[in-house]
Amino acid sequence: MRTTLYYFTGTGNSLACARAIAKGLGDTDLVPIASLRNEEHIRVPSERMGIACPVYFYSLPVLVREFIPRLDLSAVKYAFLVATMGGLPGLAVEHGEELFKKAGGELHAGFAVRMFANYVAEYNMRGERSVRAMQRRMERRVAEIVRIVQAGERHLETGGPFDRLLGRAMFNLLGRKFVQEARTRDQRFTVDPSCVHCGTCAYVCPVENIRMVDKSPRWLGHCEQCFACIHFCPAAAIQVEGKRTRVRGRYHHPDVRADDIAGQRRAG
Ligand SMILES: Cc1cc2nc3c(=O)[nH]c(=O)nc-3n(C[C@H](O)[C@H](O)[C@H](O)COP(=O)(O)O)c2cc1C
Ligand code: SF4
Ligand code: SF4
């Protein structure tokens, strides 16, 4: 069965996962969600479809929350969601289910896949060993996901009662505000004098939210908070105001390059 696998990624985890799933399933088209951000009506062309994206603030990224309701799911017989995250998926799968219902369809499987946590505004990046452990874990999880999807099983990883309670509390406490404010949270980004004026930040941004003015980045207020600009800056010159990002490391998935992140602006 042919599969359309839509994806969104800031630092490559979700793309690495999507690529591995596509390889496992075979006959899969990988389509960047960012390339469809201005399309009102998106007809899914295959009977099987999936979405791979990160968890943001115990839910799905705003880009994905706004993408699912615009899908025409009339041809779809099986839909799955792969939410990559750092350890706390919260309500991501549950919200995925709700959004598919809103689009007149159904989410048959939802997976929360623990990868490398990239939210540098709150914590430091872990070392190489942790990246290798993530890759091994991802391979195991992908094998499981491919088996479940190929079998057409129902499988929703919404967590146990305690996880759901915690997810709801955290989403209510922080996630709702994030959803409302995400686009303009780029006001918190600042640039250090160590900037080498290379333009990489503007190049990688999957939604063209950075313009170079006098060789320095200016954020335009329609940010997805993917953190690609922060993590791909070769001088680690972009900081999140009021956070200790200057003393923290940067990360992107070892198999994903700046070109891949930038490539999300183009279809297919
Ligand atoms: C704005 C933002 C919010 C995040 N919120 C969460 C979260 O609520 N729970 C979690 O486990 N990880 C969270 N993370 C970590 C990412 O979900 C995780 O690193 C993900 O695999 C990144 O995927 P990507 O490389 O495809 O962008 C967050 C990251 C960002 C940038
Ligand atoms: S400005 Fe930075 S954080 Fe915002 S969408 Fe673009 S790359 Fe992502
Ligand atoms: S990527 Fe970093 S060094 Fe390059 S222009 Fe942007 S802020 Fe400056």
Image: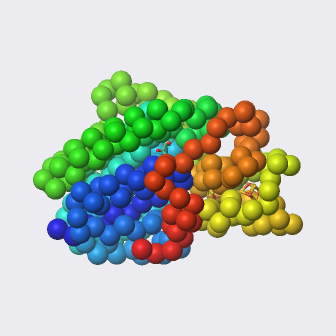
Q: Quadrant of residue 220?
A: bottom right
Task: Please tell me which residue is depicted at 53% across the width and 59% down the height of the picture.
Answer: 257
Q: Residue at x 50, y 71 (%)?
A: 35
Q: Is residue 121 visible?
A: yes
Going by the image, does 265 lie left or right of 98? right
Q: Is residue 128 above or below residue 97?
A: above
In this rendering, does residue 100 appear at all? Answer: no
Seen in the image, is 121 located left or right of residue 1? right
Counting from the top left corner in percent of width and height, residue 89 is at 42, 37
Quadrant into which the C terminus falls: bottom left
Residue sitting at the far top: 162
- Relative image position of residue 147 (x, y in whole percent): 17, 49
Camera-nearest residue between 161 and 111: 111
The N terminus: image quadrant: bottom left
Looking at the picture, tell me which residue is in the foreground, 174 or 214. 214
Q: Is residue 88 above or below residue 32?
A: above
Looking at this rendering, what residue extends furthest in the left direction? 151
Q: In the drawing, does residue 130 fall left or right of residue 79?
A: right
Ligand 3's quadrant is bottom right
User: Image quarter for residue 176?
Assistant: top right
Residue 238 on image: x %, y %:
74, 48
Task: From the viewer's side, name the closer residue of 167 and 118.
Answer: 118
Q: Is residue 137 above or below residue 149?
A: above
Q: How is the image coloured?
A: rainbow
Across and down, in percent, residue 124 comes to 61, 32
Q: Residue at x 16, y 56 (%)?
A: 150
